[in-house]
Amino acid sequence: QGGKEHFAELWLGTHPNGPSAVSSSDEANCMHESSLKHVIDDDPSYWLGEDAEQRADLPYLFKVLSVRQALSIQAHPNKQLAQQLHQQAPEHYPDDNHKPEICIPLGHFEALVGFRPAADVRRHVSEVPELAFLCGVASGQGLDREPDLRELYGTLMRSEAEEVRCQAAMLLERLAAKGAERSPEEELICRLAHEYPGDVGMFSVYFLDYVRIGAEERHRFIFCAPDEPHAYLSGDAVECMAMSDNVVRAGLTQKHKDVDALLSMLTYRDDLLADLVGSGERMAPHVVKYAPPVQDFVVYEIDGPVPEGLYLEKAAITTCVGGTFSVHFRPASVEHCSEGGMKHQAELGSSFFSKAGSSLVVDASTSGSGRLFVATY
């Protein structure tokens, strides 16, 4: 804002690829800064509570994401595959943990998420000659039966680079001639071709669901389950994921591509969209909960006062993405909302780490658009 430097991602947590620092004051009111991991390591029982007997770190990584150019066609490995990939190529897969992930848009957001119904994909292959060529299917051939999604997508993604560039050029020439008659998917293909010229990833638009979440659609989420393909295309969002930086990429990227690994790990299910894209649960007047089917994390969104406090059984990270709040973290031993815990002003960019067993008490926002997000587990 206001000419300040821009960043694509803000990481909040203890992952070594982007560890957070914590500022705190001592008894003399002098400020000190140290890494969040060191803070936890110094007194794990205090910060993690009973979990300190089972773990020495947070099980999640929290992020704020700003997408101005499409991110890669990718998938996140399950635990078993993550261990295999880490052992085989630790330079590309730095963690032995899985990476389920939830994405909560902060405004208009676009993504490719999961496979379209197979019938829709076969229709695209039948109607788009350039796609048919790269999928190894004669143009106009009926596809009511085989080949299936696995074979079609595998043939496409393994296409020779020169063939992809040639077919992409012909497709873009046809789409340019259509002008205002282009479909939203065709408009997206033109955009991706501009961002990643000649990249086979642009053809994934014909295979994956094109999800558009409007700015007025509050409390929506995208869940990136293990072994399911996705690509974030544009918009700002809050993300939370298991503690891992493992990403298997195959297109729309200048980073390392592992096409064979991605193609072999995908489930190729075409009926998951309703499970992967949904809405959070309103559990109190100003509290929305996002709880995907994993044990590594849960996210809360707060858009107004919570005078009674939101009890956080586990260690948590709270960040403000808009508005200004007065917040304090009440220890479990304190019963009354007005007692215990120093009050802090939370504004855009403010983040706080709280110990297990705290209650987050929030006073009214000075802005009607204020939003706090809390990551815990």
Image: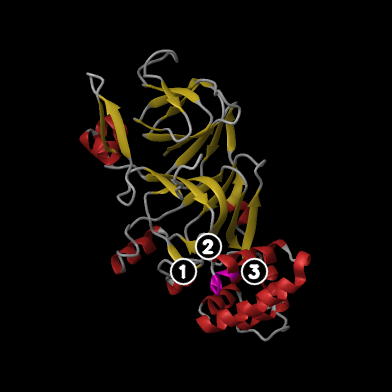
Please rate how many residues cluster around mark 3, counting C-alpha atoms within 10 Å: few if below 14, some from 14 to 19, many from 20: many
Residue ID at (49%, 25%): 325
Residue 146 visible: no
As shown in the figure, which amino acid type bears the numbered disc 3? Tyr
Q: Position of residue 213 (x, y in %)?
A: 64, 49
Residue 21 visible: yes
Q: In front: mark 3 or mark 2?
A: 3
Relative to 136, is 6 on the left or the right?
left
Check whether the beta carbons of the residues at disc 3 and disc 1 lie within 8 A of each other: no
Q: Nearer the viewer, residue 30 or 248?
A: 30
- Which sits earlier in the primary sequence, circle 3 or circle 1? 3
Check whether the beta carbons of the residues at disc 3 and disc 2 lie within 8 A of each other: no
Q: At numbered mark 2, what does the secondary structure look like: helix, strand or loop?
A: loop
Q: What span is colored magenta in the figure?
A: 197-202
Residue ID at (53%, 46%): 237
Check whether the beta carbons of the residues at disc 2 and disc 1 lie within 8 A of each other: yes
Q: Give the residue at mark 3.
A: 206
Residue ID at (67%, 41%): 216
State yes or no: residue 199 in magenta: yes
Gap in angstroms between the C-alphas marked 3 and 2:
13 Å
Q: Position of residue 272 (x, y in %)?
A: 60, 57
Relative to 153, is 178 on the left or the right?
right
Q: Give the residue at mark 2.
A: 229
Gap in angstroms between the C-alphas marked 3 and 1:
18 Å
Gap in angstroms between the C-alphas marked 2 and 1:
8 Å
As shown in the figure, which amino acid type bears the numbered disc 1? Leu
Please rate how many residues cluster around mark 2, counting C-alpha atoms within 10 Å: few if below 14, some from 14 to 19, many from 20: many
